[in-house]
Image: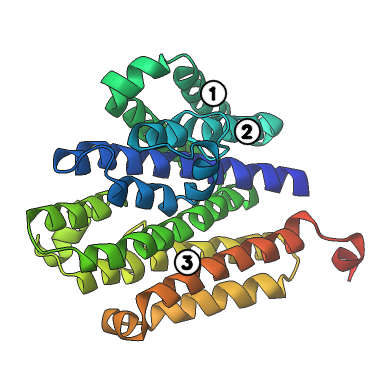
């Protein structure tokens, strides 16, 4: 597969996953947390921005900005390349560049989502019906993933799409838990604290799944263990790492190139997650562990691009 094709498929998937994640965060923020706190309470919207890495650029663009500006910045602002609207546009552009490599149904789905969001009345949505906007993004992303699995051959291109999705998802979960965990542990016990733990799980689409494992009883250690180590929950870090390893092995087998750096980084990450226990995460310090996960994901991105995107002719010949 041409490196430009692999790169476009990879980023198409990452951008759409990023848009879905941000839409879910904002939906939970506006439907759960705002029931019990004021919209401009910085203890809630600043961690929201921090969990997506948007806090420093937001502060630069809006020195006096508060909750309303933060939501607009994350959802609609064209100056924010990580906003929902910008990410869907970037996903569509990458798909457009490789239309011959994806199915017509995939293109129709993503193109339709893009024009649906672009045609929306952003002022009315942000003030009156933000849930419908976020729901459209989440449903559009889920639809695209289902169409991809149903219409695209599960060969090299499909695996690059999976790699993009899970390499975006794993550090998202790690960053969200990193930002929220210590703050929630330090909060006073009570109904609001409980709702915020529920909101954290809902931000990963994990509340119902968590209840099936642990019932509705919430403890910090259980939440951390579930989001980091559960082997079958699709947004846990362990599940993402395992899915990454499976697709990377398939790419290596089909491509015929040996990517030692990729194998080393993903192997180390999978092993660390496979044998870890929830109590060990807490005892050893959850924040350093989560930051290590994020760094390993960044390293995997670099090794992946060295091996398959920016490789030299000499390396491929050897």
At mark 3, the secondary structure is helix
**Disc 3 from disc 1: Cα separation:** 29 Å
Q: Are marks 1 and 2 in contact (CB under 8 Å)?
A: yes
Q: Earlier in the sequence, mark 2 or mark 3?
A: 2
Q: Secondary structure at mark 2?
A: helix
Looking at the image, which residue is at 27% across and 44% down?
Answer: 41
* Other-residue count near label 1 (Cα within 10 Å), few / some / many at <14 / 14–19 / ≥20: some
**What mark, if any, has residue 111 been given in the picture?**
1
Residue at (13%, 63%) from the top-left corner?
Answer: 188
Residue 221, image x and y in percent? Answer: 23, 74
Q: Which image quarter is the C terminus in?
A: bottom right
Can the viewer see residue 27?
Answer: yes
Secondary structure at numbered mark 1? helix
Foreground residue among 56 and 272: 56
Q: Nearer the viewer, residue 313 or 50?
A: 50
Please name the residue shown 85% across and 64% down the image. Answer: 316
**Dot 3 crowding, Cα within 10 Å, few <14, some 14–19, many 20+:** many
Q: Is residue 115 left or right of residue 23?
A: right
- Decide if residue 39 is on the left or right side of residue 309: left
- The spot of residue 110 in percent (x, y) is 51, 28
Q: Alpha-carbon distance for marks 2 and 3?
A: 25 Å
Question: Would residue 143 be visible to someone looking at this image?
Answer: no
Among the 4 quarters of the image, the one containing residue 11? top right
Q: Is residue 93 left or right of residue 147?
A: right
> Where is mark 2, residue-wise?
95
Place of residue 154 in the rendered image (x, y in percent of width and height, measured from the top left): 55, 49
Q: Which residue is mark 3?
A: 241
Alpha carbons under labels 1 and 2: distance apart: 9 Å
Question: Which sits earlier in the primary sequence, circle 3 or circle 1?
Answer: 1
């Amino acid at each position: 597969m041409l490196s430009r094709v692999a790169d476009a498929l990879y980023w198409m998937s990452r951008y759409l996953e990023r848009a879905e994640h941000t839409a879910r965060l904002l939906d939970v923020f506006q439907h759960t947390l705002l029931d019990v706190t004021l919209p401009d309470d910085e203890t809630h919207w600043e961690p929201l921005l921090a969990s997506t890495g948007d806090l420093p650029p937001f502060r630069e663009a809006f020195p006096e900005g508060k909750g309303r500006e933060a939501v607009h910045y994350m959802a609609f602002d064209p100056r924010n390349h990580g906003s929902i609207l910008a990410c869907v546009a970037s996903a569509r552009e990458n798909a457009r560049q490789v239309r011959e490599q994806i199915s017509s149904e995939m293109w129709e789905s993503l193109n339709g989502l893009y024009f649906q969001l672009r045609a929306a009345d952003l002022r009315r949505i942000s003030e009156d019906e933000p849930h419908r906007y976020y729901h459209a993004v989440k449903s559009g992303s889920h639809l695209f993933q289902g169409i991809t699995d149903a219409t695209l051959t599960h060969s090299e291109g499909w695996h690059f799409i999976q790699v993009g999705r899970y390499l975006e998802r794993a550090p998202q979960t790690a960053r969200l838990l990193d930002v929220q965990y210590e703050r929630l542990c330090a909060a006073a016990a009570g109904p609001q604290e409980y709702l915020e733990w529920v909101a954290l799980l809902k931000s990963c689409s994990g509340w119902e799944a968590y209840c099936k494992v642990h019932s509705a009883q919430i403890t910090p250690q259980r939440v951390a263990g579930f989001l980091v180590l559960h082997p079958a929950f699709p947004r846990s870090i362990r599940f993402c790492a395992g899915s990454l390893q499976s697709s990377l092995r398939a790419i290596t087998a089909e491509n015929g190139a040996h990517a030692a750096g990729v194998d080393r980084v993903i192997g180390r990450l999978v092993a660390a997650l496979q044998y870890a226990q929830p109590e060990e995460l807490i005892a050893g310090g959850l924040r350093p562990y989560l930051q290590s996960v994020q760094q390993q994901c960044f390293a995997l991105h670099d090794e992946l691009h060295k091996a398959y995107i920016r490789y030299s002719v000499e390396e491929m010949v050897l």
